[in-house]
Image (cartoon, rainbow, N blue to C red):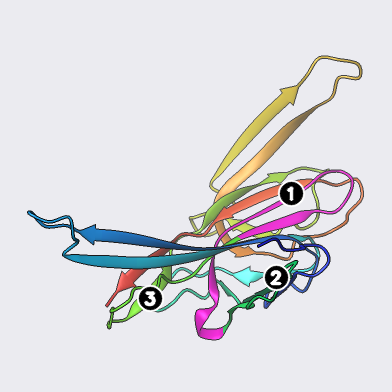
Amino acid sequence: MTVIIGAGTTVTSSVISGGFVSVSFSLAPSVERLFQLGSFDAFDTQIQTQESVSLSNYGGASTPVTLTQNTTCADSTAKMDVTITPAPCTGSTTPIVRTGGTALFITSYSYSKDFQGFGQESWSLQGKPDIPGFTGSLAFIQGFSEGNHTIGADIVSDDGIVLTGSVPATSFDAVGRSLSVSAGSPSLGQDDTQEFGKITQVGGAVGQEDGKRGTSTASIPHQLIFF
């Protein structure tokens, strides 16, 4: 069904207070059929359903989330409560509510801002899979998070990540550089320095900061375990 994004669809989050630019939700089932010799009828089926959400919002509207890798068989603490209420053109629809025990896990984060305008944050979220008939316990544990950001005099005061080195007392692991210039009049380009390292926090990036720009990205790996 068609939904009106700007006029009616609403999103609420425990991490983001407002300024939502876009949202997408996916509920994707995976069906494995166990065939046997002598028949086209499946002996059995195994079904696993995975859900994911992608969010984008203007900077200045989120609170930081601390990233701590798991040392026990417990769920990751990098979670976000999300409620999505679509506004269909006809009829009604059921809101998508993922809060408390069904809150979604943050698997990646990025931030981007040009010299003018507002910066934007992007979040990728994932839930635990739904496995019919499974009677054991599941945990979604958080691994070692890493990423990079641009540094320099023209970079925003907060690009939404806290980056450190993997070894104590170091502020980063490696430094990269990218240079791009094109011919023309005027001929402008970018010469950027990037720091790479461990990420210990995401979110809280600035919105409007005139004359400043910034980019950052963080990967937050999670692993499903059965016990």
Q: Are discs 3 and 2 less than 8 Å apart at CB?
A: no
Look at discs 3 and 2 and give the one toward the viewer.
2
In the image, residue 58 lies at what x, y percent?
Answer: 79, 60
Decide which of 120, 1 is in the foreground and name it.
1
Q: Secondary structure at mark 3?
A: strand
Q: Which mark is residue 69?
A: none
Label 1 sits on residue: 112
Q: Magenta residues, as a range?
A: 100-123
Q: Residues within 10 Å of mark 3 (few under 14, many from 20)?
A: some
Residue identified by numbered label 2: 86
- The quadrant the N terminus occupies is bottom right
The image quarter containing residue 121 is: bottom right
Q: Amino acid at mark 3?
A: Ala
User: Which one is nearer the viewer's eye here, 9 or 3?
Assistant: 3
For residue 56, say whether it is visible.
no
Is 215 placed above or below 107 here? Answer: above
Residue 8 seen by the camera: yes
Which label lies toward us, 1 or 2? 2
* Rendered position, 195 above or below 125: above
Residue at 83%, 66% in the rendered image = 7
Q: Secondary structure at mark 1?
A: strand
Mark 1 and mark 2 in contact? Answer it, CB < 8 Å.
no
Name above or below for residue 159 compared with residue 86: above
- How far apart marks 3 and 2 lie (CA) works out to 30 Å
| Amino acid type, mark 1 | Ser
Q: Secondary structure at mark 2?
A: loop
Is residue 31 in the magenta section?
no
Q: Which residue does the numbered mark 3 point to in the structure image?
A: 139
Does 38 sit left or right of 215 as displayed?
A: left
Mark sitting earlier along the chain (3/2): 2
Nearer the N terminus, badge 1 or badge 2?
2
Residue 100 lies left or right of residue 215; in this view the side is left
